[in-house]
Image (cartoon, coloured by chain):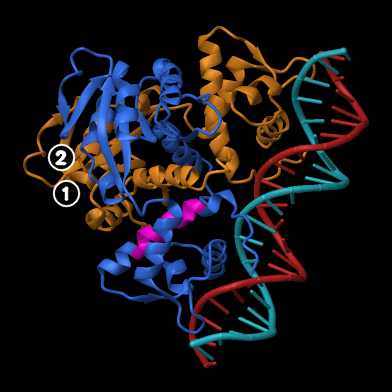
Chain colours: A blue, B orange, C red, D cyan
DNA sequence: CTCTGTGAACGACTTCACAGCA
DNA sequence: TGCTGTGAAGTCGTTCACAGAG
């Protein structure tokens, strides 16, 4: 068996598979075929099998996949078989909401601190997370061994904060600021532009005929 | 000139081009080459040109593209040359944050109403938007001719609310609930799974060596 | 018989490279 | 010369179809 490097899009689908498997487990379902998994996620059985075999052989011919072990494997592959410390940079409306959001912890992410520049926010606690001045980023990143940051600052401040985060040793940035960030080599950026997501819907509706996918 | 149907991914990049062009315009820059645009967005000049020519010929050889007219064209293509009425369904932490978020209006989306089932939330006003009971969705969708909904309800309630939205005549759903939605034909779903986005970062960092893209 | 794992065929998207206009 | 628009070539990802395990 030759494990070829997986295409970039595969990781995204692994997250979907994992989510669906967790739901199946909660329903008490113990085995699942690629066909069943594909049906509930609007993809194909071949796609599911090919995606999974990029990382190993997890199924049994004639049997399908066992849910619980496959969940373990996917978590290991995605790196969420342990807890990651995360910081939130920018405690505006969106940042505050994410500090209260419980979905991250369920997936193995723990927000350990938040940062802002506004005197009105520094020193407060939002959703049981303390808000520090951004000056404290290097110290706290080191102390908690933080590798991931969620950036919810205004676009104007985003690049400067990114530089600071890179220097502090952060390895991944979830970027909600509507701007493209330059990072040091080895630092990954995952952009999330909420307005652009609505634009995509607008496009698919406006150009009727093909609301593909 | 034969306008071939554009690949699916192109629309996503159009949003990026538009965002960058708006920034250039704000800086007073009037003309831009595919090369310049590509450089600031980490893509290639050929990609930019190919993407744009799927929708028309907007540039002048030897000259490049004029920023302002190209912005107009992109807005027209994306359908954001007019204002869309949007509703928010689910006024938890995330929903509340989005009701206060100003980025949508800048892009031509106006949140006209919000909905929840909790007696503690119905009747309140969040970020100058009134919160109604979900029973009121059909009436208000009709009244404001709403085509887009932002779904920020818990996963358990998401499918039921989706059915309601489809019956009410909504044509696009921005789905923050961590579940796959079934919709009526002609209704588009754009999923946004925030925990999955963090998972992607985790994956790219954990599997060192290739933090591609 | 059922269902996985997998090379081979197919199709979609990207990059190349150049003709032609400014 | 500089730069766009575009067929052709190349690359990457998906789907097919089947051998073989259970």
Q: Is residue B188 left or right of residue B128?
A: right
Instruction: List x then y, in percent, for residue B31.
Output: 66, 12
Instruction: List x then y, in percent, for residue B118.
Output: 10, 45
Q: Is residue A87 magenta?
A: no
Residue B145 against residue C2 in the figure, above or below? above
- Identify the disc placed on residue B63: none
Instruction: List x then y, in percent, for residue B127.
Output: 20, 25
**Are the residues at dot 2 and dot 1 in contact (C-beta closer than 8 Å)?**
yes
Q: Chain of mark 2?
A: B
Taking the view exactly as shown, the residue that stands out farthest to the left is B120
Question: Label 1 neighbourhood size at 10 Å, few (<14), some (14-19), many (20+)?
Answer: few
- Identify the disc placed on residue B135: 1
Q: Tell me the element at label 2.
A: strand
Q: Tell me the element at label 1.
A: helix
Q: Which residue is mark 2?
A: B132
Q: Chain of mark 1?
A: B
Identity of the residue drawn at 59% across and 55% down: A6
B92 or D5: nearer the viewer: B92
Q: Is residue B82 left or right of residue B24?
A: left
Residue B130 against residue B116 in the figure, above or below? above
**What range of the chain is rendered magenta?**
A11-21
Residue B107, by quadrant, is top left
Question: What whole-number distance in Å separates the C-alpha atoms at marks 2 and 1?
Answer: 8 Å
Magenta region, main secondary structure: helix
Residue A21, by quadrant, is bottom left
């Amino acid at each position: 068996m030759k494990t070829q490097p997986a295409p970039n899009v595969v990781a995204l689908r692994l997250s979907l598979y994992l989510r669906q498997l967790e739901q199946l487990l909660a329903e008490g379902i113990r085995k699942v075929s690629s066909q069943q998994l594909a049906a509930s996620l609007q993809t194909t059985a071949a796609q599911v099998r090919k995606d999974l075999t990029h990382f190993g052989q997890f199924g049994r011919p004639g049997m399908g996949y066992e849910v619980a072990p496959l969940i373990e494997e996917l978590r290991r592959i995605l790196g969420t078989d342990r807890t990651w410390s995360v910081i939130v940079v920018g405690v505006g409306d969106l940042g505050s909401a994410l500090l209260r959001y419980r979905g991250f912890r369920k997936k193995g992410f723990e927000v350990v601190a938040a940062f802002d520049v506004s005197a009105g926010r520094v020193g407060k606690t939002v959703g049981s997370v303390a808000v520090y001045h951004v000056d404290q980023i290097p110290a706290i990143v080191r102390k908690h061994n933080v590798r991931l940051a969620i950036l919810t600052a205004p676009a104007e401040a985003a690049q400067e904060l990114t530089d600071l985060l890179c220097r502090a040793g952060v390895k991944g940035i979830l970027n909600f600021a509507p701007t493209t960030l330059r990072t040091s080599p080895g630092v990954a950026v995952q952009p999330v532009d909420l307005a652009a997501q609505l634009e995509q819907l607008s496009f698919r509706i406006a150009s009727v005929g093909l609301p593909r996918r």
